[in-house]
Amino acid sequence: MKNNKLKKLEAIRGFSALYVVLFHMLPQKIYFLGINVGILFRFGSEAVILFFVLSGFVIKYSWEKSTDKSFHSYFIRRFIRIYIPLFFIFLIGYLLKCYSEGALANPEWKTLLGNIFMLQDVISLKPNVVSPTYMGNGLLWSLSYEWWFYMLFIFLTKKISKTKINTLVNIIVIVAAISYLIYPFIVNRIAMYFAIWWIGVKFADIYLTGGKYSFKSMLPYAYVVALIITILGLNFYLNFSYTKIYKYPLVAYPFVELRHFIFSFIIMFGAIIWHRWHWIGFNNIFGIFKYFAPFSYVIYISHDYLVVKATYLNFINHKIVEYVLYFILMLLFSYLIEVIVYKRIKKYVMYYFVNKSIKN
């Protein structure tokens, strides 16, 4: 999509990344003219769901536009996209911990392996989590979902005919949601959330075939999402006692899953309505954020270390100046890693694999 970028998606991607940073960075109460405007920055969880929908669209679009549809090519591209920036985040998380402790810190090998194999989630907010996120970087939870969405997508796309794939996805996500009532764990949790990612795939299908974005075109899948919302509503009722266990019940099991799916439903029809209104006001609100899109991934996965939990500038003794500098340094670091370093590594890796495949 280098020369054919869908600018609105880029703008939303940049906005979502910065919004998550502000969600974690700003206090819950910010009063302006006697009104608590801080409430506007309390929807970081929803911003991550927006990422999932965008990802589904982009992966489907890129797949259909690609000339090499081999699993090998797809896997390498997805692997380097996720892991090259991520390894820099692992490293900086460890180095900052060493700095804060004033000595070589415990590298937490077991947790690191859990994150490398994409088994991580926020252990303090969900039951039956396999591995916590590395060095307490809670943002890494979504990467495990994202990675397995990629793998499930390529498996279904390569193995299932186009006429049957949507039906099979519907069955997978509904069965996963029902099993979530019995025993919530990584497999059925990710399979259930695949329903949110697939909204983006459905939108991409419409876009690629020149179809019309309408309530009618999305209605069959809306029933699937609505059914999962109903199941999660029942799950919330049956497991309400968990809201007294977790410290932040609004972002914890069993409420957070229901919250995520309700928002995905809003995204589905909100996008159709705004499209009908010819995206009025979109550029004025979101247009500027397209400039942050090229390094939005690293903004997202680095800000916990570089801003939220940062202490490396606390000698400044002025909190506003300190956090403004944290924010600027995060942007510079993100640009360096994703726009400069990642692109160069990607170029060499892809060159190597292309030449290798030609020789074979």
Image (cartoon, rainbow, N blue to C red):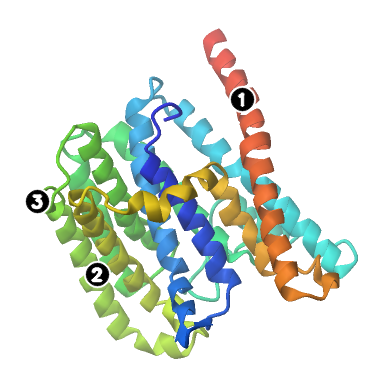
Q: Earlier in the sequence, mark 2 or mark 3?
A: 3
38, above or below 295, in the image: below
Q: Which of marks 1 and 2 is nearer the N terminus?
A: 2
Q: Mark 3 points at which residue?
A: 216
Q: Mark 1 points at which residue?
A: 347
How far apart in space, not on screen, are marks 1 and 3 (Cα)?
A: 43 Å
Mark on residue 111?
A: none
How far apart in space, not on screen, are marks 2 and 3 (Cα)?
A: 20 Å
* Residue 155: percent from left, percent from top: 35, 38
* Residue 127: percent from left, percent from top: 47, 74
User: Which quarter of the picture shows residue 104?
Assistant: bottom right
- Verify CB contact (< 8 Å) between mark 2 and mark 3: no
> Which part of the image, by quadrant, shows the C terminus?
top right
How far apart in space, not on screen, are marks 1 and 2 (Cα)?
A: 43 Å
Amino acid type at circle 1 is Lys
Is residue 337 found left or right of 189 in the rendered image?
A: right
Amino acid type at circle 2 is Ile
Q: Mark 2 points at which residue?
A: 229
Circle 3 Cα neighbour tier, 10 Å, few/some/many (<14 / 14–19 / ≥20): few
